[in-house]
Amino acid sequence: AVEQGLGVGEAADAEDAVVEGLAALGAPLVHLAEAMARGSLPLVLGGGHEMAWGTFQGIVQARPDASRLLVVNLDAHFDLRVAARANSGTPFRQMHEWCAERGQTFNYRVFGISRFANTQALFDRAHAMGVRYWLDDSLQDAAGLRDAQQALAIDLARSDAVYLTVCLDVLPGAQAPGVSAPAPLGVPLAQVERLIDQVLASGRVVAADIAELNPSLDRDGLTARVAARLAARIARSSGA
């Protein structure tokens, strides 16, 4: 279920639920790790993308053996900012630092980056960190999507675990107006779903989240419906 105000999923029997919704975040990251230990696929619903740092901590707590963790983000923004306090723009920079401190590779792929919504400093930082990304204008047609999926297939095959995270501002503003920065172009929902389906079909997804829903900015509940559709897609893939 997707509820207004940084939705929380509920299951009639949490012990048997394959997909479990968790509030963002803090203590729930412990529950995320516990859900993974039970063989469930945690699905975190938000809220700002700062929750991704909590999801990541839950994953590495539950799967310390996942040395080849692939982070797949569908997002208009890199979220690699440097700031005095963690926020929705910093989670993937925090993950990079965590990996660097432990001598681990930071495998981060972003689909839907807007060249106009990220500073040159962020593009430079992404390049320095070895981040691979695809611009929103390259994912508008079948040919561009095919090229991205071919590269993604290679990355998925090389991973032993995948963290899938979707920021709703990757979508066109007309399809997802209830975000802090609606996209003038964005990646069409049908293209986003095909990328999500490919990631899920790998069988390597250990946790997922959907970020950036703000009901106070939504129009006719449209963004909430899109989020619910994506959540149901992820749940169905897991057998819930």
Image: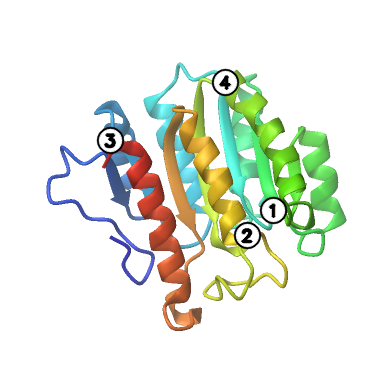
Q: Nearer the viewer, mark 4 or mark 1?
A: 1
- Numbered disc 1: secondary structure: strand
- Check disc 2 and report the residue beneath it: 170
- Check disc 3 and report the residue beneath it: 35
Classify mark 2: residues with Cα within 10 Å, few (<14), some (14-19) or many (20+).
many
Question: Cβ–Cβ below 8 Å for labels 2 and 1?
Answer: yes
Colour scheme in use: rainbow
* Location of residue 109 with respect to 79 vertically, above or below: above
- Check disc 1 and report the residue beneath it: 112
Who is closer to the viewer here, 127 or 195?
195
Determine the CA span between mark 4 and mark 2: 25 Å
- Callout 3 amino acid: Ala
- Numbered disc 2: secondary structure: helix
Of callouts 3 and 1, the N-terminal one: 3
- Numbered disc 4: secondary structure: loop
- Check disc 4 and report the residue beneath it: 68
Classify mark 3: residues with Cα within 10 Å, few (<14), some (14-19) or many (20+).
many
**What x and y, as percent, mark residue 232?**
36, 53
Whether residue 171 is visible to the viewer of this picture, yes or no, is yes
Residue with the most extreme left position? 13
